[in-house]
Image (cartoon, grey):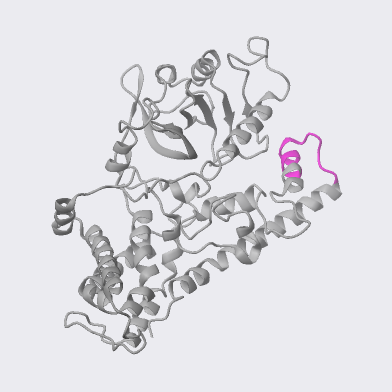
């Protein structure tokens, strides 16, 4: 939920020594509000172009040309567009950039706060950079999910009175079934929770379970990794949890709202319990720009499920290829949620420009059909979707997006059922080459597109 602070709260936050980044964000807000008041009260007799630049004594930037050089040099570092995923080592570059941001960029904005108020053009030409920096810091900070609120406030808001009660609590029967896979699946079957064991997501073998609230206020989606033998959950494993809010205290929502948590499943001496650490660092928006992610629509080496209580085939065996049918049903449900209402926890517009326009990605990733892809979108996730899964590709007339033909060939290559013919293998190899070229083209335009976005408004 959005953070609300009274007048005394604003003052306390601004004066609190340990909240330097927050204070700078609030100073920006105050500057913009004060400017709006100035413009509203102006009689409009003096045009902006005729108004001389006003430089304060504290501000080191004295002219529009100096402001232009400042934002151009600030935007020159490609570390701005790196995400900190397993496939994109960014610690060194990000650490150095963060030091520069704190010691130079934010310090300059602090010292020049009155200059921003006094010079509307400077306020505008720095607007995107000033909005992006706090967002970028949250996306790279340790102990943060990357939302506008810190983790403590974010988790606390999920259980406020207006929220559906129980939405963020994993079912007791599921916790009691830990850590054995067979016990978890049995609990899912008897309680009517559709589940799937699959090794086509994020690496390793994972167990997916979804639970629908009897009053249809929310759905719960849980995923937890299994050990290499796929028989049990290891001690200290992460149970990733998403509550899909469909109704609040006032009724049905126009768009669903997603609420993320990372629980830790731990052995408490003969039984397993869940711990909710406050300082987890998974950057949820980096992988969930469109909201709920679809499962890879291939068999992989393992795709297993069984009918659950309430389904027609429950108790009468497992129909042929039922695991893949379950995967397809789950994907239909996941897709049905659509792009969520982030409800103040994320403002996608602060994460930079929409990427992939030249490839046609924005045809679907337009913020309506699918979420906008930005420099916050995890690089490893993009590579997996475009290259490893052969799902996404450049959009053009006559192309099928997702690339269903390539996905079907990929599935048969994995299962050998039936084996690919030489012509089909050649077609799959061509598809891989095309997808790899799309990925390289997408990555190559990330920094230039972001830089052009930051510098779109000239200071002079």
Hey, which residue is sitting farthest top in the picture?
315
Is 47 magenta? The answer is: no
The N terminus: image quadrant: top left
Mark count: 0
What residue lies at 77% left-to-right and 36% top-to-bottom?
416
What residue lies at 68% left-to-right and 17% top-to-bottom?
318
115 or 418: nearer the eye?
Answer: 115
Up the image or down, 223 lies above or below 141; here it is above
Q: Position of residue 388 (x, y in %)?
A: 63, 49
Task: Mark yes or no: residue 165 visible.
Answer: yes
Up the image or down, 401 lies above or below 189; here it is below
Q: Position of residue 290 (x, y in %)?
A: 53, 47
Task: Mark yes or no: residue 302 visible.
Answer: no
Q: Can you tell which quarter of the image residue 89 is in?
A: bottom left
380 lies left or right of 89: right
Is 416 magenta? The answer is: yes
Q: Can you tell which quarter of the image residue 17 is in?
A: bottom left
64 or 289: nearer the eye?
Answer: 64
The C terminus: image quadrant: bottom left
Q: Position of residue 133 (x, y in %)?
A: 35, 64
Per the rendered image, the range of residues in magenta is: 409-421
What residue lies at 17% left-to-right and 79% top-to-bottom?
58
């Amino acid at each position: 939920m959005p953070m609300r602070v009274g007048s005394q709260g604003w003052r306390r936050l601004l004066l609190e020594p340990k909240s330097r980044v927050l204070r700078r964000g609030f100073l920006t807000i105050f500057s913009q509000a004060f400017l709006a008041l100035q413009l509203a009260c102006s009689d409009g007799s003096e045009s902006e172009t005729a108004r001389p630049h006003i430089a304060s004594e504290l501000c080191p930037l004295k002219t529009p040309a100096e402001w232009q050089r400042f934002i151009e040099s600030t935007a020159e570092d490609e570390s701005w567009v790196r995400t900190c995923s397993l496939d994109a080592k960014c610690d060194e570059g990000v650490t150095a950039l963060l030091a520069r941001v704190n010691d130079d960029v934010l310090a300059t904005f602090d010292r020049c706060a009155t200059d921003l108020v006094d010079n509307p053009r400077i306020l505008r030409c720095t607007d995107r950079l000033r909005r992006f920096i706090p967002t970028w810091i949250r996306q790279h900070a340790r102990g943060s999910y990357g939302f506008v609120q810190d983790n403590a406030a974010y988790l606390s808001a999920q259980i406020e009175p207006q929220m559906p009660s129980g939405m963020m609590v994993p079912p007791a029967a599921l916790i009691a079934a830990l850590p054995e896979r067979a016990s978890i699946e049995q609990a899912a079957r008897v309680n009517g929770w559709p589940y799937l064991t699959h090794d086509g997501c994020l690496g390793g073998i994972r167990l997916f379970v979804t639970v629908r609230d009897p009053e249809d206020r929310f759905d719960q989606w849980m995923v937890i990794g299994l050990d290499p033998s796929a028989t049990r959950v290891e001690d200290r494993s992460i149970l990733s949890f998403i509550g899909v809010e469909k109704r609040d205290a006032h009724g049905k929502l126009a768009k669903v709202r997603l609420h993320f948590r990372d629980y830790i499943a731990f052995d408490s001496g003969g039984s397993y319990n869940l711990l909710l650490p406050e300082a987890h660092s998974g950057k949820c928006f980096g992988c969930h720009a469109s909201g709920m992610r679809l499962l890879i629509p291939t068999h992989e080496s393992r795709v297993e499920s069984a009918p659950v209580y309430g389904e027609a085939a429950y108790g009468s065996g497992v129909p042929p290829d039922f695991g893949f049918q379950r995967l397809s049903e789950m994907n239909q449900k996941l897709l049905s949620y659509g792009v969520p209402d982030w409800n103040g926890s994320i403002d996608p517009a602060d994460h930079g420009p929409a990427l992939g326009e030249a490839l046609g990605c924005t045809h679907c990733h337009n913020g309506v059909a699918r979420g906008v892809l930005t420099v916050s979108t995890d690089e490893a996730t993009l590579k997996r979707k475009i290259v490893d899964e052969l799902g996404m590709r450049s959009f053009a007339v006559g192309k099928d997006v997702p690339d269903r033909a390539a996905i079907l060939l990929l599935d048969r290559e994995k299962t050998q059922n039936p084996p690919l013919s030489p012509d089909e293998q050649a077609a799959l190899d061509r598809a891989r080459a095309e997808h790899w070229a799309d990925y390289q083209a997408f990555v190559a335009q990330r920094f230039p597109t972001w830089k052009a976005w930051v510098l779109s408004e000239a200071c002079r």
